[in-house]
């Protein structure tokens, strides 16, 4: 009998689940995610599930981790300071695929060099300028390197990476290691985001491995990739970008395992995001354009999923325009006031009571801040560093007492973006506490915070809501509305409709909304989903029944829906995909583009066989290193030819190799 341990570290909760022989759930447990020290939440959840099941830790044969950490970090714009080395490109190329926006204030060096489409050197690499830039100490925690046509010849990326490692000792992400496809700016963006996540994911894995060891668990640790496959902890450290959508991908695997459903939408609500995917024939599809999280479209292979900044801990934003006003949720995640009141009751209640005594609503009513320990604060501007020091000295503090000038508002937002501090404010979780749907944290703190929010004024000068109950219901109704929109957008995007209107506009269109209301006049309008929805997440049972009613569809809420991510983390397979290209730069020459550089052959089939042999060897080795056994190899070829003078002319060939197998079980 093999007992498998799945762990999911989410934005709010850390889940642990034990599965026997991949057939049934023995036990599950939850603990609060402790972002200042993830080991605490992991340890509590694992200890709980071991104790409740009576399972000796030495009986655990495999441990696997899924996480929303990378996804949430990109949605919220968090991560370490990164230096980008951009080889062979122009200044205006930084605008491609949002690369400049992703850089923000981080340093970038545009360097001469790069190759052409055939793999020939376009310009020599400017070693001297790179050396001078690196010696200036850019304050970066990691570096990203992207060179023009590096997937056709990676020589300049490898040379630059070697210099960076020798001079700075910092981790380096090369774009050609993350994707074999063309499109330099998109590869650069992927490498940049990978570098930004390296420190964050490494800390998570280190903490997880350390805590498992402390608990007596000696089984190897796996990590869920964004396509639902498993990789080793070491591979995840090197390529943390591949763990974006890890948690949601695990939830899809878990949903399929729990319900056996063939065709459905799967909607997973967490603390920060709602992640929606389509199941067809029991399998999620891989996004051919690369994973998108927030505004960033990467080259990472991941489950085709629509991620929305909407969760149980989404910040409630007051809409004070117009006569009635209202609220909107997200995309930023904040700590619920009920949670921070549970953890620091004295300062929270003292502050809320004082704010309630004020006759005029304050800009920062029910908003708190606290520092996150253990995060690298290197490279902060003086103003930001001074503000961080004040926050650290006071632990949990009201934001109004921390900010001394208007200019410090931007400094505070920069600290939040770096993940150095956490904000707390009113969330749907607080509304659920006030409505009596949840009772795990400080209900009184939630009610006081909602009372403060309710007295804010709309454009007509009236209160936003008359009672705490009305305010809470307004927030929950808004969550239902935004969830319905997200599900409709996903469904519309999958339909072949001749309207020529984007999916998000269709979901919001007045005809769609009237159809949801079941309009009956001279025209009858009905809109809904024609497939069931599998609702996942700890709060799904609180919010999703109403969503199902609104959409007129079956809402499947499995008894283990709250730990679907942890289940999916341990029932998946190890899968490694590698691809490569053969081109024909001139007649009779067939060029194989490898990591070691281009190789030429005189026969197309010889070149294709060489590429396939290399890819299969690499994929098998990486699958084995990831912990797979009984590895199966599958290969597909995509050949592009043209007709010329009654003969077929070879233009280009792409080979995709997939190596997959179940992870080895410790004996």
Image (cartoon, rainbow, N blue to C red):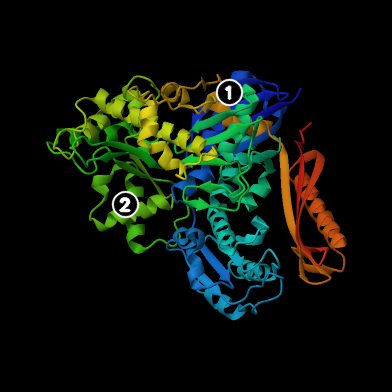
SS for tag 2? helix
- Mark seen at residue 386: none
Q: According to the image, label 1 marks what residue? A: 28
**Is 660 on the left-hand or right-hand side of 45?**
right
**Is 267 on the left-hand or right-hand side of 351?**
right
Relative to 117, is 316 above or below?
above
Q: Residue 542 location, x and y as percent?
A: 42, 22
**Circles 2, 1 touching at the beta carbon (< 8 Å):** no
Q: Is residue 374 visible?
A: no
Local crowd size for mark 1, using a 10 Å CA cut-off: few (<14), some (14–19), many (≥20): many
Local crowd size for mark 2, using a 10 Å CA cut-off: few (<14), some (14–19), many (≥20): some
SS for tag 1? strand
Q: Is residue 59 visible?
A: yes
Is 26 in front, or is 349?
26
Q: Nearer the viewer, mark 2 or mark 1?
A: 1
Residue at (59, 24) in percent of width and height: 49
Q: Residue 352 location, x and y as percent?
A: 23, 34
Is 183 in front, or is 629?
183
**Is 323 on the left-hand or right-hand side of 375?**
left
Q: According to the image, label 2 marks what residue? A: 390
Image-quadrant location for residue 113: bottom right
Relative to 169, is 443 above or below?
above
Image-quadrant location for residue 558: top right
Image-quadrant location for residue 513: top left
- Tell which circle, 2 or 1, labels the residue nearer the N-terminal end: 1
Q: Residue 502 location, x and y as percent?
A: 45, 44
């Amino acid at each position: 009998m093999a007992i498998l341990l799945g762990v999911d570290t989410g934005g709010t909760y850390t889940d642990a689940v034990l599965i026997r022989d991949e057939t049934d759930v023995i036990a599950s447990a939850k603990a609060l995610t402790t972002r200042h020290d993830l080991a605490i939440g992991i340890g509590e959840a694992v200890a709980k599930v071991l104790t409740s099941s009576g399972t000796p830790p030495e009986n655990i044969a495999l441990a696997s981790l899924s996480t929303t950490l990378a996804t949430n970090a990109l949605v919220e714009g968090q991560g370490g300071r990164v230096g980008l080395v951009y080889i062979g490109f122009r200044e205006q190329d930084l605008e491609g695929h949002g690369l400049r926006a992703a850089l923000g204030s981080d340093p970038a060096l545009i360097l001469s060099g790069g190759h052409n489409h055939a793999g020939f050197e376009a310009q020599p690499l400017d070693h001297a300028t790179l050396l001078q830039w690196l010696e200036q100490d850019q304050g970066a925690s990691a570096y990203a390197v992207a060179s023009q046509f590096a997937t056709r010849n990676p020589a300049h990326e490898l040379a630059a990476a070697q210099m960076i490692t020798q001079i700075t000792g910092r981790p380096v992400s090369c774009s050609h290691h993350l994707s074999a496809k063309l499109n330099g700016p998109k590869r650069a963006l992927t490498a940049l985001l990978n570098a930004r996540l390296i420190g964050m994911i490494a800390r998570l894995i280190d903490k997880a491995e350390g805590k498992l060891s402390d608990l007596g668990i000696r089984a190897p640790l796996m990590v869920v990739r964004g396509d639902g496959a498993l990789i080793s902890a070491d591979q995840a450290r090197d390529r943390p970008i591949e763990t974006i959508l890890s948690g949601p991908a695990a939830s899809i695997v878990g949903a399929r395992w729990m319900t056996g459903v063939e065709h459905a939408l799967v909607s997973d609500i967490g603390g920060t995001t709602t992640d929606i995917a389509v199941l067809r024939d029991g399998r999620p599809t891989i996004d051919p354009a690369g994973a998108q999280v927030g505004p960033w479209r990467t080259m990472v292979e991941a489950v085709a999923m629509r991620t929305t900044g909407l969760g149980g801990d989404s910040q409630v934003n007051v809409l004070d325009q117009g006569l009635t006003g209202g609220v909107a949720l997200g995309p930023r995640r904040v700590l619920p006031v009920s949670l921070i009141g549970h953890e620091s009751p004295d300062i929270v209640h003292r502050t809320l009571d004082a704010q309630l005594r004020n006759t005029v609503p304050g800009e920062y009513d029910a908003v708190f801040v606290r520092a996150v320990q253990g995060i690298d604060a290197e490279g902060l501007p003086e103003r930001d560093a001074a503000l961080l020091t004040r926050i650290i000295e006071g632990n949990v503090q009201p934001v109004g007492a921390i900010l001394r000038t208007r200019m410090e508002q931007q400094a505070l937002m920069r600290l939040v973006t770096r993940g150095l501090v956490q904000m707390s404010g009113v969330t749907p979780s607080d509304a659920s506490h006030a409505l009596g749907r949840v009772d795990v944290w400080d209900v009184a703190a939630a009610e006081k915070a909602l009372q403060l929010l309710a007295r804010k004024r709309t454009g007509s000068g009236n209160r936003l809501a008359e009672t705490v109950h009305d305010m809470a219901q307004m927030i929950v109704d808004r969550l239902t509305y935004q969830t319905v929109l997200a599900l409709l957008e996903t469904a519309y995007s999958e339909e072949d409709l001749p309207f020529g209107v984007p999916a998000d506009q269709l979901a919001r269109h007045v005809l769609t909304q009237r159809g949801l209301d079941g309009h009956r006049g001279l025209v009858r309008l009905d809109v809904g989903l024609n497939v069931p929805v599998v609702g996942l997440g700890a709060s799904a049972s609180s919010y999703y029944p109403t969503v199902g009613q609104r959409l007129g569809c079956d809402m499947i809420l499995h008894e283990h829906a709250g730990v679907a991510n942890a289940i999916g983390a341990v029932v998946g397979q190890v899968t490694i995909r590698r691809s490569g290209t053969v081109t024909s730069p001139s007649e009779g020459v067939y060029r194989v583009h490898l990591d070691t550089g281009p190789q030429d052959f005189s026969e197309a089939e010889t070149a294709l066989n060489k590429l396939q042999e290399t890819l299969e060897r690499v994929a098998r080795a990486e699958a084995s290193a990831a912990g797979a056994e009984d590895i199966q190899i599958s290969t597909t070829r995509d050949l592009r030819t043209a007709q010329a003078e009654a003969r077929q002319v070879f233009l280009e060939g792409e080979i995709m190799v997939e190596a997959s197998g179940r992870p080895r079980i410790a004996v």
